[in-house]
Image (spheres, rainbow, N blue to C red):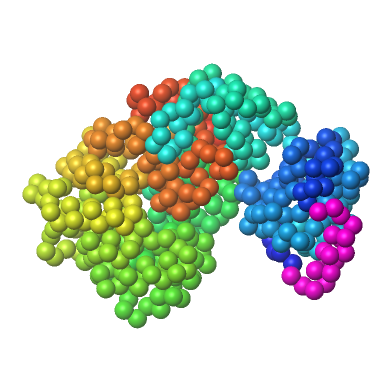
Amino acid sequence: MPQLSGFATRGVRARRLAALTALTLSPFPAAAAQLAPQRSLVGSYSAGALAVAFDSSGAWRVTLNGTLGVEGGFEVRRDTIVLRDRGGPRACTPDIVGTYTWARNGGTLNLTAVADACQGRRGALARAWTATAGSIQAFVGGTVIDGTGAPPRPGTTLVVENGRIRDMFRDGSKPLPADANRVDLGGRWVIPGLIDAHVHLATDPSNEDNRATVLRRLRNALRGGVTTVRDMGGDARVLAGLARDANLGEIESPSLVYSAIFAGPDFFRDPRIVASSRGVTPGAAAWGRAVRDDTDVPRAVAEAKGAGVRALKLYADLPASRLRPLVEEAHRQGLLVWSHAALFPARPSDIVDAGIDVVSHASLLAWEPVAQLPPYTARARADFDNVSPTNDAIDRLLRTMASRGTILEPTLLVVSPQGQPSKAGAWAARVTTRARALGVRIAAGTDGLIEDAETARPNLPEELALLVRYAGLTPLEAISAATSVAASALGVQDDRGVLAPGKAADLVVLSRDPTADIRNVRSVEWVMKAGKRYGGTTP
């Protein structure tokens, strides 16, 4: 975090300086109650990716790209401001206060450190800041679908500040912030930003996934309502750059999390993994690792984590005996584990028993009752005619998934050409219906974000339509599959996937009711990601 890391300073010198500074101050919050903040300081300011806000209640906060760093209380004494941290991932201990002079000249706020033992706070704040016009936005009169599965809430106000949802309440039940920019939604529908839980952006960056093409895909996906994506295996060198640029707002793109592929040695002859490993021996890359009996699992997982991945993706040619060590080590190092629903020779129950977090491709669950699985190259040849989705073995598997909290990502779209399920697609839809009935959480992913046309729209609404029409999800459940449940699948549930105070301001405004027809998620008027508004794609 530029100029924001290391807020906590622990040395003796720092303690002494903090104590000397504190002697000159009345303790918080009493002083804040006695000395109201000067109105000319109150407001929001930015300096590159950093933002600072001072509000009339005496609270202040610093964010980086809309993500909270520190929040606390402040007190103004003429041309001096005194700050104390109260919380946030970059906060100093509350006993370390900071004293700054401040001067506002038109739209510029200058903060100069007088005494602050917290080096990170001093480095972040002591600079010239530019006032942010209309930084508080109040969206009034919308019908909010919050992503939790709760019924729509008509007549709801959303207050957005510094890239986050500051408040949400019934229209008129609270006064709007005095400095808010009021936007009347006129009854339009508001849903959380959509999350496509299965995309591939960097399989072949030197050719079909070249940067210009991928940037067009990402731009169109964002304008179509997709604010976050989960990349399920590609060149991490490219993905890290895309994720960084998206996070900083340097490209028009959904936020991006991505995985490293861990698979058996035979998989690394696949031309896709060869393409995403250019310059490295296939199977030896941190983001594409061949797993053998002698693999140093802790080191391999650490190297994957160093490549910036959110999770390991287990793909193919892996026996059951290799799964649990991978899963346990990944979890120990703070990574999730995502997997195809069958790994050949490992079957679905082996995968779930090992503690996988998310399984992809419902059609692969058809391999559960088979005595011996074939090589992964035969994965599409399951006997869909003679294996029932309610087979006892599959039922046991689904009940185990429900009890463990394992998420199922069905990817109906890839087995439904032109929107009509194939034999595999019909079977996948039926097993998804059964999984839902038994309490398995369903996440929505396409395995194909968007087409390449200049005006293409994302494929995720088609996946949602298939889940409703063929798998029996309600429109509200389908929206949750692409918001709150998908956020859990990606490990971003603390920040995204639900419209609620404190969450990132990722939202989509629709002109038509998606609960009446899930296809209305196509009726995008505009999109907001981290508080920044983008044009929609309504036909």
Can residue 68 be spotted in the picture? yes
Give x and y (percent) for residue 492: 49, 51
Q: Is residue 366 above or below residue 117?
A: above
Question: Closest to the observer: 236 or 204?
Answer: 236
Instruction: Please give the name of the residue rendered at 84% of the width and 65% of the height, measured from the top-left corner.
Output: 19
Question: Based on the displayed image, in which of its 4 quarters is residue 261 positioned?
Answer: bottom left
Q: Is residue 469 above or below residue 35?
A: above
Tell me, yes or no, whether the highlighted magenta stretch contains residue 15. Answer: yes
Q: Main secondary structure of the magenta part?
A: helix
* Magenta stretch bounds: 10-27
Q: Check the picture and name the quadrant holding the C terminus.
A: top left
Question: Closest to the observer: 107 or 448?
Answer: 107
Can residue 201 be spotted in the picture? no
Q: Check the picture and name the quadrant holding the N terminus.
A: bottom right
Give x and y (percent) for residue 356: 34, 61
Q: Residue furthest left?
A: 386
Give x and y (percent) for residue 220: 49, 36
Q: Residue furthest top?
A: 186
Instruction: Please give the name of the residue rendered at 74% of the width and 39% of the height, measured from the top-left corner.
Output: 57
Q: Residue furthest right?
A: 78
Instruction: Please give the name of the residue rendered at 56% of the width and 30% of the height, measured from the top-left corner.
Output: 169
Relative side of 322 to 303, left or right: left
Give x and y (percent) for residue 432: 24, 44
Question: Based on the displayed image, in which of its 4 quarters is residue 5 positioned?
Answer: bottom right
User: How many numbered discs, if any?
Assistant: 0
